[in-house]
Image: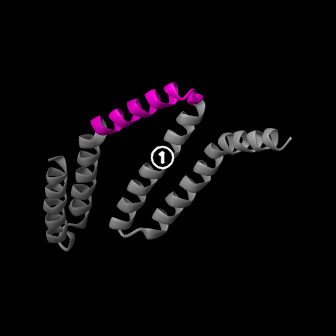
Amino acid sequence: MEIVQIVGIGLITAVFVVLLREERPEIALLISIIAGIFVFLLMLNKIATVLSLLQNMAARANIDFIYLSAILKIIGIAYVAEFGAQICRDAGSSSIATKIEFAAKIIIMLLSIPILMSVLELLLKILH
């Protein structure tokens, strides 16, 4: 079970980070970042599987890939921003974390405009 491995990695990392944070905070942060990247790499295969399934479902439902692509980009931005913000918070820089989250929200808003426009056009067609 992969979740047991991931939780094990997280717990071991947390212990090392707690032990090193007082004496060597830069190494503690580096260990935390490396563990996060390692967990992400473990999940790449799962992410690829989900993306493939979503593409197949979109093709079967005749959904334009542009919309699916935008939604996947939005999800990816949200995950990457959350990861970056948490690293900043771990490093003690919550103000930078907040700015990362703000930038991600703006980018997500921009990426969602074509989808919103399409929905509005569809509503206008239905109403007329």
Q: Main secondary structure of the magenta part?
A: helix
Q: How crowded is mark 1: few (under 14 residues within 10 Å), some or many (20 or more)?
A: few
- Residue 95 locus on image (x, y percent): 48, 69
**Which residue does the image show at 80% across and 38% down from the upper left?**
125
- Which quarter of the rendering shows the C terminus? top right
- Residue 16 locus on image (x, y percent): 14, 64
Left or right placement of residue 109 versus residue 93 in this view:
right
SS class, disc 1: helix
- Residue at the disc numbered 1: 75
Left or right placement of residue 33 versus residue 97 in this view:
left
Nearest to the observer: residue 20 or residue 54: 54
Q: In this view, does 58 lie above or below 111?
A: above
Residue 54 in magenta? yes
**Which residue does the image show at 19% across and 59% down from the upper left?**
10
Count of marks, rendered view: 1
Residue 36 in magenta? no
Nearest to the observer: residue 64 or residue 123: 123
- Outermost residue, right side: 128
**Which residue does the image show at 38% across and 55% down from the upper left?**
83
* Color theme of the render: one colour
- Residue 31 locus on image (x, y percent): 21, 56
Task: Name the kind of residue labelled 1 in the image.
Answer: Ile
- Outermost residue, bottom side: 22
Q: What segment is highlighted magenta in the picture?
A: 45-65
Left or right placement of residue 28 versus residue 56 in this view:
left
- Residue 56 locus on image (x, y percent): 44, 27
Left or right placement of residue 41 versus residue 54 in this view:
left
**Which residue does the image show at 53% across and 62% down from the upper left?**
99
